[in-house]
């Protein structure tokens, strides 16, 4: 039972354009959503998060949008840079459980 | 500030052998997590510690896996005996107080190969 799904295993975007990574979830008890970025041979690093009571959070080039009615969130990266090439994981925190449930990840490749 | 340290980084063992992984969390972080990451998948929680207490070990296969966090700092995760299906990356993470929506800091992981 995959509670957090990233349906695109990979995404290729040209440098300078917008990258949009998507994530769907099924559990209404999630109260926080987070995005992590992972380079090869390294552990995931935190990128940005959003509370379930908000619909948008922005941090520099990164913006996360949350659509609770659709149980969908997305990460926008503008403009995309070569250093953004990595695997991006969507994660959701179960209310009160301090436990993260991760999606399968999307490999983003930024082409020069 | 040093990050989460894990060792070894890589381990190759034969099936039925025991193996142990070690984790040193970020100083002052009282919450420690062990995750399993299979190829092409996201991390899956095995166990969570608050200080030295295991507060969530519901996903830990207790027939062969064990973990400890003595003195509420370093932690070890053990598999005995290892099976072929245990080949994966084992990630350790820590956080300050495990706050809701709080960031977890991950180590680089230990890549285990069971032959």
Image (cartoon, rainbow, N blue to C red):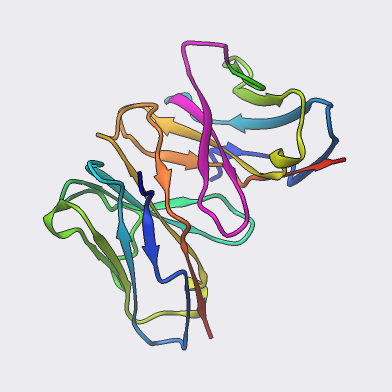
From the viewer's perspective, tell me whether residue B88 is left or right of residue A85: left
Q: Which residue is painted at 41% across and 43% down in the image?
A: B105
Name which residue lies at 43% across and 39% down: A100
Q: Position of residue A75 (x, y in %)?
A: 66, 26
Question: Image quarter for residue B77?
Answer: bottom left
Q: Image quarter for residue B63?
A: bottom left
A37 or B67, nearer to the observer: A37
Position of residue B35 measured from the top left corner of the image (x, y, whole percent): 41, 54
**Residue drawn at the location 35% of the way across and 82% of the way down:** B81
Q: Position of residue B22 (x, y in %)?
A: 32, 66
Q: A53 above or below A49?
A: above
Q: Quadrant of the N terminus of chain B?
A: top left
Q: Is residue B23 visible?
A: yes
Residue at 42 percent of width and 32 percent of height: A93
Residue B67, image quadrant:
bottom left
Question: Residue reaching furthest left?
Answer: B71
- Residue B48 painted magenta: no
Give the prevailing secondary structure in the magenta stretch.
strand
Membership of A35 in magenta stretch: yes
Q: What stretch of residues is rendered in magenta? A: A31-58
């Amino acid at each position: 039972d995959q509670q957090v799904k990233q349906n695109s295993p990979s995404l290729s975007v040209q440098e300078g354009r917008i990258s949009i990574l998507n994530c769907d979830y099924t559990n209404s008890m999630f109260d926080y959503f987070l995005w992590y970025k992972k380079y090869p041979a390294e552990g995931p690093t935190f990128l940005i998060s959003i509370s379930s009571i908000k619909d948008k959070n922005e941090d520099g080039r990164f913006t996360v949008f949350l659509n609770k009615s659709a149980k969908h969130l997305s990460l926008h990266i503008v403009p995309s840079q070569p250093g953004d090439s990595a695997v991006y994981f969507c994660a959701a925190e179960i209310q009160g459980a301090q436990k993260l449930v991760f999606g399968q990840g999307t490999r983003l490749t930024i082409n020069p | 500030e040093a990050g989460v340290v894990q060792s070894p980084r890589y381990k190759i063992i034969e099936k039925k052998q025991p193996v142990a992984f070690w984790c040193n969390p970020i100083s002052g972080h009282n919450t420690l997590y062990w995750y399993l990451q299979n190829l092409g998948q996201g991390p899956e929680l095995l166990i969570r510690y608050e200080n030295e207490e295991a507060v969530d070990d519901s996903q830990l296969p207790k027939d062969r896996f064990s973990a400890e966090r003595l003195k509420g700092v370093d932690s070890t995760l053990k598999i005995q005996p290892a099976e072929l299906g245990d080949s994966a990356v084992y990630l350790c993470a820590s956080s300050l107080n495990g706050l809701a929506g709080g960031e977890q800091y991950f180590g680089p992981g230990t890549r285990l190969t069971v032959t």
